Amino acid sequence: MNTARRNRKRARIIQLRKRLFLSGTVIAVLIVMLFTIIGLKDVNATNNSDNPMYKYYTSYEIQPGDTLTSIAQKYTVNSNVSISEYIREVKKNNNLVSDRITSGNYIVISYYSDEYK
């Protein structure tokens, strides 16, 4: 009977060791996956900063049919600026209280380039 008890105890210890090994392996794989995902995010952030965008200002003559939205759509290409943010900035820089603009007038607008001038 004593040997039967020892055998059961050994079997439980072996089962426990297997479970611990399996748990450790799963945790190690999850940690590797986590660091891989974090590393990929860092690579994407680095790639975006490899080509920085520079912001410049220029005078723009308003053409017939132009709206602040159409101007914003032209000059926010390849930038991280939303159209509504761009329009707010143009209105602030030009002291505009409404979205109405008149052709022939000039406004100061910003544009973005990856070239440093």
Image (spheres, rainbow, N blue to C red):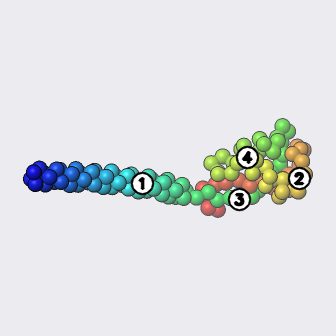
Quadrant of res 95: bottom right
| For residue 86, side relative to residue 44 (left or right) | right
Q: Nearer the viewer, mark 1 or mark 3?
A: 1
Q: Which residue is mark 1?
A: 34
- Against 67, is 54 above or below? below
What's the distance in space between the residues labelled 1 and 2, CA to CA? 49 Å
Q: Are marks 1 and 4 in contact (CB under 8 Å)?
A: no
Q: Position of residue 16 (x, y in %)?
A: 24, 53
- Residue 96 numbered mark, or none: 2
Q: Secondary structure at mark 2?
A: loop
For the point 58% across and 58% down, the residue is 52
| For residue 115, side relative to residue 106 (left or right) | left
Marked residue nearer the N-terminal end (1 or 2): 1
For the point 90% across and 51% down, the residue is 97
Q: Which residue is mark 3?
A: 56
Marked residue nearer the N-terminal end (1 or 3): 1
The amino acid pointed to by label 1 is Leu
Residue furthest to the front in view is 1
- Residue 83 numbered mark, or none: 4
The answer to whether residue 14 is seen in the rendering is no
